Image (cartoon, rainbow, N blue to C red):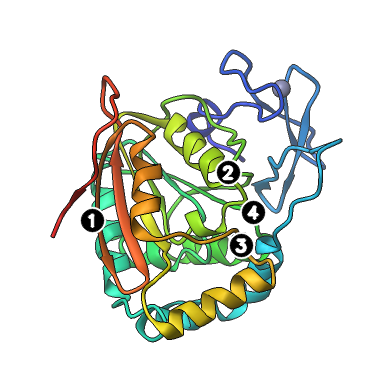
Amino acid sequence: MIRPEFLAILRCPVCCTDATALHVAGLREPSLACDCGAMFPIVDGIPDVMPHRVGEPAKNYRTETLDNVLAGTYDLLMPLMSATAWRCDPLHFVDWANMALGRAQGGFHLSLPISTANILRHSWGPHLDLQVVAVDSSWEMLHRAKRRLRRAKIDALLIRADVERLPFKNGTFASILSVNGLHTFDNRAYGLAELFRVAREGGTLAGSTLIRDQGRFAEWVLDRYEHYGLSPMLRGKHFVCSELAELGGKVSYESYGAVLFFAVEKLAETSAQHPSRLH
Ligand SMILES: [Zn+2]
């Protein structure tokens, strides 16, 4: 059900150590099991590796609920909103995804959030040699992504997981793509640190995020996001870039309207560097 090469990169998000391996247990109702006793169900072939947060306060934001509602119209809404409210040609998303996939060079690639896999499908063509892992927290998005990846003959591992506790070993991925993910993370600092942890040395973390101060209509829409608690406070370009620089890699970026595209290269010997513009 889960290929051995994928099992080998997984780790338990409860005990959070690379020393313990997850293994598949159960035949009728399979799950992923850890030596620490944690069990994670596999639903329709998709492991649900979302750790229980017993004793932790409920999250403030309703991003997952919104994603479940949006899943049905996402493929229409995403390019439409991009071209109008965000003033960003949707083809930029495909260009940046192509760049990120190209940097994987046959290794493991992580897409988080995968959403409906529409970006991955459009940029997949030349990258047949990759091992693709696709993560989201929304079941609706994951089910749609699964159907789309199957139609495109992309043999990916889909996982429901929390970006703040990723179920992957350190240094696993040659490339990570997070399309419109940062502005949906409950805690951007934790999420970014986790993504960087699972990137390998020489690997790239790339993606896009919405940013503030880019026009009245975009600001009005983003105000509604915040008002209804749909995602955390969004920030301006320089604030986000300074957060990316704190990861300690080499940062490059460019922005179109209210969309910031970025790439952070994980250097062999990480040291903080200032961001530089591509254009
Ligand atoms: Zn464990």
Q: Report the side of 182 relative to 109 (left or right).
A: right
Q: Quadrant of residue 163 in the image?
A: top right
Q: Amino acid at mark 2?
A: Val
- Mark 1 and mark 4 in contact (Cβ < 8 Å)? no
Mark 1 C-beta closer than 8 Å to ligand 1: no
Which corner quadrant of the figure contains ligand 1?
Answer: top right
Provide residue 84's location: percent of width, then percent of height. 38, 86
Distance between mark 2 and mark 1 Cα atoms: 28 Å
- Mark 3 and mark 1 in contact (Cβ < 8 Å)? no
- Mark 2 and mark 4 in contact (Cβ < 8 Å)? yes
Q: Report the side of 31 relative to 264 (left or right).
A: right
Number of other residues with Cα within 10 Å of mark 4, as a class: few under 14, some 14 to 19, many 20 or more? many
Number of other residues with Cα within 10 Å of mark 1, as a class: few under 14, some 14 to 19, many 20 or more? few
Provide residue 62's location: percent of width, then percent of height. 71, 63
Q: Report the side of 261 relative to 28 (left or right).
A: left
For the C terminus, the image quarter is bottom left
Mark 4 C-beta closer than 8 Å to ligand 1: no
The first of marks 1 and 3 along the sequence is 1
Residue at image point 60% right, 64% down: 141
Residue at image point 31% right, 53% down: 262
Helix, strand, or loop for circle 2? loop
What residue is disc 1 on? 126
- Mark 1 and mark 2 in contact (Cβ < 8 Å)? no
Provide residue 201's location: percent of width, then percent of height. 31, 26
Residue at image point 78% right, 31% down: 39
Distance between mark 4 and mark 2 Cα atoms: 9 Å
What residue is disc 2 on? 163
